[in-house]
Amino acid sequence: MHTESVLTLLKTLQNQICTALEQEDGEAKFVHEAWTGKLGIGETRVLKNGAVFEQAGVNFSHVKGTQMPASATAHRPELAGAAFEAMGVSLVIHPKNPYVPTSHANVRFFIAYPENAEPVWWFGGGFDLTPFYPFEEDIVHWHTVARDVCAPFGESVYPEFKQWCDEYFYLKHRNETRGVGGLFFDDLNRWDFDTCLNFIKAVGEGYIAAYLPIVTKRKNTPYGERERDFQLYRRGRYVEFNLVWDRGTLFGLQSGGRTESILMSMPPLVRFEYQYAPEEGSPEAALNQFLVARDWLQEFGK
């Protein structure tokens, strides 16, 4: 299996994304920390207290194990008990300004080695956007890039992976989406290996093209204590999703991954408030209409 080509791509994407984020921040730099765990190696890069990004984490990991974790076999029971190898880059960006959305992306590759059978490989990943004060033009830009990333691979790819994202990043206990979606896919081996690898490359590079123009446009928007309090409150939803629903978090913990790196996705500051309700007609209340699955490009004619 062509694991070396995947590893090369993942490390290249980690470098490209970190460089782009550092340039956008203009002040802080990523601290690099290589680590060795029970099942493998990785490199965690974290930028803290920048001019633009309050905390940004971009992780690379490469692990191997003798038995697939339960989180990875729940929807593939035929691979239960198989040895595995997994590698990926995962990132979460928590900006300082409440008008700049939080964003997440990851690309990953799995191989399972069932006994007396050929290895089974697949890719997964995607990117999604979580604004607190949404702007329709930003959402349209985000989804336009997502559509364009998918276009060379087939007309049905964007609608399919967009719907998958809406369904995956959904807080069932809140009856709301985590944000305004993007792309999500798993078990990707519908094309040959090289085509799948090229798609992963397009997703990783597409994340930069989708996110940074929004950051540039919103990072100097004036804000006050009210907006900051709302940002910290809404970050609580991010915590809830990652700890309750996210398969990636579960996989990392169940596979013996490095806890600090896995929980790097958490916001550095967050607040919870009992029975909070935004004032009717306020900008904070307006967020609710965005926390549903919508066809953004069709609605706004793009």
Image (spheres, helix red, strand yellow):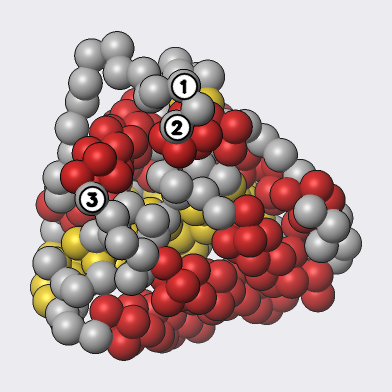
Residue 149, how many percent across, how many down? 69, 71
Looking at the image, is 126 positioned above or below residue 292? Answer: below
The residue identified by callout 2 is 282
Give the spatial CA distance, label 1 vs label 2: 6 Å
Q: Quadrant of the N terminus?
A: bottom right
- Disc 2 element: loop
Judging depth in this view, the residue of 221 and 296 nearest the camera is 221
Residue 300, how many percent across, how many down? 79, 53
Total numbered labels = 3
Residue 73, how many percent across, how many down? 49, 35
Q: Which residue lies at the image location 17% right of the left edge and 83% below the top edge? A: 27
Name which of mark 3 and mark 1 comes first in the sequence.
3
**Crowd rating for badge 1 (residues with CA inside 10 Å; few <14, some 14–19, many 20+):** few
Name which of mark 3 and mark 2 comes first in the sequence.
3
- Disc 1 element: loop
Please say if the residues under marks 1 and 2 sit with CB atoms less than 8 Å apart.
yes
Judging depth in this view, the residue of 251 and 297 nearest the camera is 297
- Disc 3 element: loop
Looking at the image, is 181 positioned above or below residue 193? Answer: above
**Amino acid of disc 2:** Ser
The residue identified by callout 3 is 224
Q: Which mark is residue 280?
A: 1
Q: Which residue lies at the image location 31% right of the left edge and 61% below the top edge? A: 222
